[in-house]
Amino acid sequence: MNIQAIRAPEGIRRARSENPKMRERDLAAQIGISEAELLAAHVGHGVTRIEPRVADLLPSLEAVGVVMALTRNASAVHEKIGVYEKSMTGPEHALVLGADIDLRIFPSRWAFGFAVEKRDEETDAVRRSLQFFDHLGDAVHKVHLRPQSDLAAYQALVEELVSPDQNAPITVGRVKPVAEETVDALPPAEILRERWSAMTDVHQLFNILRKLKLTRHQAVHLIGQDYAWRLENDALTAMLYQAVRDEVPIMCFVGSNGCIQIHTGTIHTVKPMGPWINVLDPTFNLHLRTDHVSELWAVRKPTKEGHVTSIEAYGADGELIAQFFGERHEGHDERPDWRLMVERLPSLSQPQMA
């Protein structure tokens, strides 16, 4: 069969039926299409096109009740069970600030949406989800129903967002833009250090890097060991085990192109499975490919309450895979047990004491 036939809707559906247990992301990669295109080929076959209108989606999701929120990138999957509470929406940024589901959303990057119904062959139960994708067809966020979810509220939400033309083709970008990290155009380290040291809030870093035209990865290399130092890659797994043992509550951030998802609290069960390190708790799961971690950094950022310490895992492309903090609330100092834990992790360069 030629490649055009395989990528036609009928060929995509045939590949799905022949590989019922393969994850959609993996099957799409095998066919050579995006995950959004794979779902688009199933419209009318358990899939409904919906509009990715974040401003309408978030308030209505609260009525659906308990669901599972999923945000992932190529190297980490972040799953939280809870309710979409305390949402705020705007054209460039949206927030969900619930007790369990905590999101930072960038609505302009949400391009395609689908409501998906899939029958589990083993249990015969129907699994329902809302899945959203960026202009490249990569997943930005997914919402999976749970047994206790309000099905009527979910169906009303799908009806509210349903696309008028279910057969409209989708066009996705084929090549991801790769940010080139060059050392030639880097600003002097003194300028970065001056602005970094003057921060009073960790969120100010974004504008500092934007104005200096630096990536986060470039910045940690440039800033100096009193603010950032390399950790051994195994220190990520060591930190998770120690957080369990010492009952140190953490914050775990995983982002896609259109959403950052956050867990805050203690973790209880950490298990390695092949290249994956996993947190497997009742309402929080993290799955992270340790073999994708090219560099692991401990980073200090000043705030008006004192510095805040993070652990940042980067892939070979310099993109951030995941970020970890100690649990902290605005206006409060960083937890000393978290800070001490990070400073004692095995490092490749000796941190300077703050």
Image (cartoon, rainbow, N blue to C red):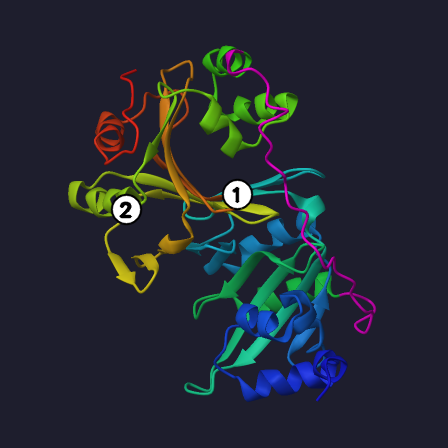
Place residue 146 in its image quadrant: bottom left
334 shown above or below 23: above
The residue at 53%/13% (across/down) is 195
Q: Measure how far apart labels 2 and 1 are at the Cα level.
A: 19 Å
Point out the tag, 2 or 1, that comes first from the N-terminus: 2
Left or right: 193 as drawn, with respect to 346: right
What's the residue type where badge 1 is placed? Glu
| Residue 328 visible here | no
- Magenta region, mostly helix, strand or loop? loop
Place residue 269 in its image quadrant: bottom left
Left or right: 297 as drawn, with respect to 347: right
Mark identifier at residue 234:
2
Relative depth, front residue between 32 and 158: 32
Image spot of residue 353 (x, y percent): 27, 17
Residue 20 lies in the magenta-colored region = no
Quarter of the figure with the N terminus: bottom right
The residue at 69%/85% (across/down) is 11
Residues in magenta, as a range: 163-190
Left or right: 283 as drawn, with respect to 105: left
What's the residue type where badge 2 is placed? Asp
Image spot of residue 254 (x, y percent): 47, 47
* Residue on which disc 1 sits: 319
| Label 1 CA crowd tier, 10 Å (few <14, some 14–19, many 20+) | some
Name of the residue lying farthest toward the left: 245
